[in-house]
Image: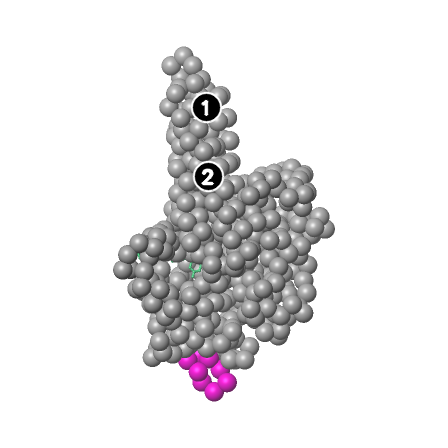
Amino acid sequence: MDFEYSPRQKDLIARLSAFFDEHIYPAVPVYEAQQAEGDRWKTLQIIEDLKPKARAAGLWNLFMPPSAGHAHVDDTFEFDSPRLTNLEYAPLAEIMGRVQWSSEVFNCSAPDTGNMEVFQRYGTLAQKEKWLRPLMNGEMRSAFLMTEPDVASSDATNIETRIERDGDDYVINGRKWWSSGVGDPHCKVAIVMGKTDFGAQTHAQQSQVLVPMDTPGVKIVRMLPVFGYDDAPHGHAEVLLENVRVPVEEALLLGEGRGFEIAQGRLGPGRIHHCMRIIGGAEVALEKMCRRLQSRKAFGKYVSEQSVWEERIAQARIDIEMTRLLCFKAADMMDKAGNKVARLEIAMIKVQAPMMALRIIDDAIQAHGGGGVTSDFGLAKSYASIRTLRLADGPDEVHARTVARMELSKHGDLAQKVRADQAARGR
Ligand SMILES: Cc1cc2nc3c(=O)[nH]c(=O)nc-3n(C[C@H](O)[C@H](O)[C@H](O)COP(=O)(O)OP(=O)(O)OC[C@H]3O[C@@H](n4cnc5c(N)ncnc54)[C@H](O)[C@@H]3O)c2cc1C
């Protein structure tokens, strides 16, 4: 076991950090000013200006892992990416997590990264040319529409959207919400999860189809706020799909009845990317906490000198280090054994990372007194944003269930049941 970064990682970390110093941190006020101006749902020029700079610096599509060993992947489709392993990407995503909007500059933002991996792994060459190429070039964005307001969507078998065959077309009817990224004018395509066969075996009812956002019948009902933040210009939408007609050949991913399989594959990398960025967010909160506590005196001494704050700071550092190591372990497992085998580590980090960061941000808010809950220090926004990650990509309880069931399976009669269940799910 080697805890040193590899020479390649060191080089990438140094180059990305230099890019942050030169371009990203100075752009924060520019981004905020552009975001505050005029229409909320627009392209921000500062992002468009920075993208070619990141690409020229070789800091583009850093998220896309090598495809060696992945079933379905046709490697004849070439694109601009250094093809880093998940472990190589982890410290870079952490740096991006320091400035919430920055990952788009490097074409590494959610939900596009998960979607691009789906296109790469399961798309036909024609689907890749039409959608993956502009996505990898940062000319387009995309959405993933699984969650529905009318059913408990943390259990994906509940999804009710109907994908019905009519000649050479599918006709889609359903209501989705929490469709992230839909507010962005660049969002041109959605991957939609629905059911093609309500009578099939539980995990073979679902399919995933591609729906261009300008298809008649796709209606954005409203944009959903997160604790009052609209997350513009990307946002999260409620989307009505009303008699949406798409050609089967162009739309279907992988095959009918294989939507559940794609969902399992998609959410692994997406989940861990969020966790990597969350660690960066926790580091920023700890820095702000330390600076603030050393800048103000109460009851005759700096607040940082009160032992309760020493304890909180120490705990924050310990928690960040432990979480980072677990994240690296999960990334390494994904690289070496694949996303399916790494599901225990992915589930553990998906629960741990947001909980850890929320505790630290909460302490940082406390350290700032009343200032902490204003928008002056960015902590309230950071809390709101990271709080959603105890829900998005599956709530904590569902991931904890994975961990608990694997643990219990080692020790009792449940072992047989879990193995039978896993066999039925094809996992
Ligand atoms: C900001 C944000 C962005 C999102 N982006 C997207 C997106 O782009 N695309 C998309 O499709 N979805 C997205 N989601 C939706 C997210 O994935 C779902 O909210 C999540 O999967 C939970 O589904 P649900 O909301 O239907 O909650 P439900 O399934 O109704 O669950 C409610 C609660 O029940 C509890 N629960 C569920 N199962 C168990 C269990 N086994 N044991 C114990 N308790 C349990 C949990 O506490 C859970 O929070 C996003 C959500 C948010 C908040």
172 part of magenta stretch: yes
**Residue placed farthest to the left in the image?**
413
Q: What's under tag 1, amino acid-wise?
A: Leu
Label 2 CB sits under 8 Å from any ligand 1 atom: no
**Residue placed farthest to the right in the image?**
56
- Dominant secondary structure, magenta: strand
**In the image, is 116 to the left or to the right of 346?**
right
**In the image, is 299 to the left or to the right of 281?**
left
Colour scheme: one colour
Q: Nearer the viewer, residue 156 or 149?
A: 156
The residue that mark 1 highlights is 293
**In the image, is 122 to the left or to the right of 158?**
right
Q: Nearer the viewer, residue 220 or 199?
A: 199
**In this rendering, is residue 355 above or below 199?**
above
Which stretch is magenta?
Answer: 164-174
Q: Residue at x 43, y 75 (%)?
A: 257
Image quarter where ligand 1 lies: bottom left
The residue that mark 2 highlights is 322
**In this rendering, is residue 414 above or below 97?**
below
Q: What's under tag 2, amino acid-wise?
A: Met
Residue 300 in view (yes/no): yes
Residue 383 position, x and y percent, is 42, 41
Residue 417 position, x and y percent, is 30, 64
Q: Secondary structure at mark 2?
A: helix
Q: Disc 1 vs disc 2: which is toward the camera?
A: 2
Q: Secondary structure at mark 1?
A: helix
Looking at the rendering, which quadrant does residue 375 occupy? top left
Q: Earlier in the sequence, mark 1 or mark 2?
A: 1
7 part of magenta stretch: no
Question: Quadrant location of the C terminus?
Answer: bottom left
